[in-house]
Image (cartoon, grey):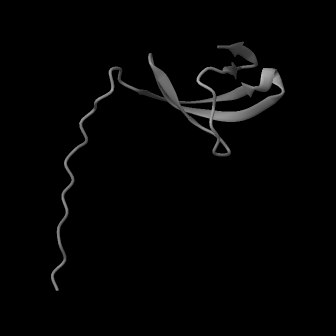
């Protein structure tokens, strides 16, 4: 039996804003400051960011993050 050659076409970028890779350490702040989770900001754009967290969870639509121990919405 011969092996099949699979060729994948490049994915079409459909986002309105391009993402920029950054790998920045941050802290997600939840529950009015009672819960803090370490996070890695993988990439960012004017419309949002991709985060890596130590566990899978549903984040609220809006939350705070700490960068260099300073809080930003």
Residue drawn at x 62%, y 37% as measured from the top left:
58
Number of numbered discs visible in the structure rendering: 0
Hey, which quadrant is residue 36 in on the image?
A: top right
Where residue 53 sits in the image (x, y, percent)? 64, 40
| Residue 32 pos. (x, y %) | 80, 20
Dividing the image into 4 quarters, which one contains the N terminus?
bottom left
**Residue 22: x %, y % from top left:** 51, 28
Q: Is residue 18 left or right of residue 45?
A: left
Task: Give the position of the C terminus as an image quadrant.
Answer: top right
In the displayed structure image, the side of residue 13 where residue 25 appears, left or right: right
Picture quadrant where residue 39 is located: top right
Q: Position of residue 33 (x, y in %)?
A: 81, 22
Q: Residue at x 58, y 24 (%)?
A: 61
Residue found at x 71% / y 20%: 68
Question: Eyeballing the image, is 6 above or below 63?
Answer: below
Direction right: furthest residue: 34
Q: Residue at x 74, y 26 (%)?
A: 30
């Amino acid at each position: 039996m011969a092996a099949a050659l699979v060729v994948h076409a490049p994915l079409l970028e459909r986002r309105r804003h391009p993402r920029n890779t950054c790998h920045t350490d941050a802290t997600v702040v939840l529950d009015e400051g009672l819960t803090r989770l370490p996070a890695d900001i993988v990439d960012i754009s004017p419309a949002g960011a991709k985060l890596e967290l130590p566990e899978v969870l549903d984040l609220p639509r809006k939350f705070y993050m700490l960068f260099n121990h300073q809080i930003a919405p």
